[in-house]
Image (tube, grey):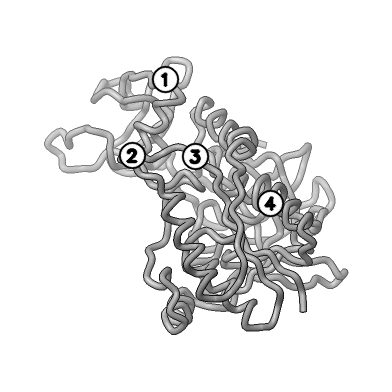
Amino acid sequence: MAKIIVGMSGGVDSSVAALLLKRQGHDVTGVFMNNWDEQDAGGACTAQEDWDDVRAVCDIIGIPYYSVNYAKEYRERVFEHFLSEYRKMRTPNPDVWCNREIKFDTFLRFAESLGADKLATGHFANLGRGPAGDITLLRAKDENKDQTYFLYMLGQKALSKALFPVGNLTKAEIRAIAAEAGLPTSSKKDSTGVCFIGERNFREFLKQYIPARPGDILTREGKKVGRHEGLMYYTPGQRRGLGIGGGGTGERWFVVGKDIENNVLYVSQGEPEELFTLSALASEPTWVSGAAPAPEGEWFPCQARLRHRQPLQECSAMLENGRIHLRFAAKQRAVTPGQAAVLYEGEVCLGGGTIDADRDEA
């Protein structure tokens, strides 16, 4: 019997993770992390609702529970990075940083202070062993829910303490288990907002922290077709929320570029060739095994995922001067600086980096 701390969010996945571990006979404690203290735009505090659900679930399962507050750590180690990226007019992925900096660092150390052998979460992922005995991070059974994309920054130390009890279940199976056990989270909808911050009017939320600078929307030919609310609100390939009419042609407008110095958003009708690329460049590489799959300067075959739920894309990668060069077998649409480029070898997540450029000019 192991002593296991379960990070419980108030959702159905972590609820079932705790239930399964309890049924296996382990000494299980549920812990809820409150990492964001502010209310949403409607004045509600979703964290309180989630905490109420955690308590109800733990009472039914028959396990003790705690609540911890890491709002200060989250703001300093995740949210400040999030804002810094937006100030650079990039599109960050806070879930990736939250997993590394909070859940599997600050929270993991708390679990260890309680004498826990393992820290379990409701992530859709699996663990295995590589040929050299290292711990491997494996894609989940439910490919549509797989969350290894958000876990690629975790290394051997964190994974040696991690458990992912629902990794071999589909979402439908998880909901069925929760319903059969009478858990109040069985039909609770999945959260889709920014990690711990929740769902809200994102433009209004971001405006509280970064002053918006409206500017011109131009075509590549220099024709003014509208005004933007601030470059930070737009990403490559975006076609909704531009506020531009079709000009009688009926063709949609797409974001194709940003001129940060002159505060100009560039758009095009239809999807131009410049939205597609056969290469990309990523920085801040991290590897699950602790080492790159090939020596520096040597290309290796792999698959890549440039956004959550994207089907794996065949590519070659090379580590050089602290950056990952990527060459794709098929053209990729709207590669977005600030997002994660996560590499795989079949079901094994190798690691990845943060996209710097949607073209690799090397």
Classify mark 4: helix, strand or loop.
helix
Residue shown at the point (55%, 76%) measured from the top left: 61
Q: Are marks 1 and 4 in contact (CB under 8 Å)?
A: no
Q: Nearer the viewer, residue 107 or 90?
A: 107
Q: Quadrant of the N terminus?
A: bottom right
Q: Is 38 rendered above or below residue 258?
A: below
- Name the amino acid type tagged 2: Gly
Q: CA distance from mark 4 to mark 2?
A: 28 Å
Q: Is 192 rendered above or below residue 41?
A: below
Choose the circle earlier in sequence order: 3 or 1. Answer: 3
Residue shown at the point (33%, 19%) measured from the top left: 215
Instruction: Say how many tags the image has.
Output: 4
Q: Is 290 rendered above or below residue 56?
A: above
- Residue at mark 4: 107
- Residue at mark 2: 43
Choose the circle earlier in sequence order: 4 or 2. Answer: 2
Choose the circle earlier in sequence order: 1 or 2. Answer: 2
Task: Locate residue 237, reporting x and y percent.
Answer: 39, 42
Task: Locate residue 254, reporting x and y percent.
Answer: 32, 39
Q: CA distance from mark 1 to mark 4?
A: 33 Å
Q: CA distance from mark 1 to mark 2?
A: 22 Å
Choose the circle earlier in sequence order: 1 or 4. Answer: 4
Q: Are marks 1 and 2 in contact (CB under 8 Å)?
A: no
- Residue at mark 3: 37
- Residue at mark 1: 211
Q: Is 305 rendered above or below residue 337?
A: below
Q: CA distance from mark 3 to mark 1?
A: 22 Å
Eye-nearest disc, 4 or 2: 2
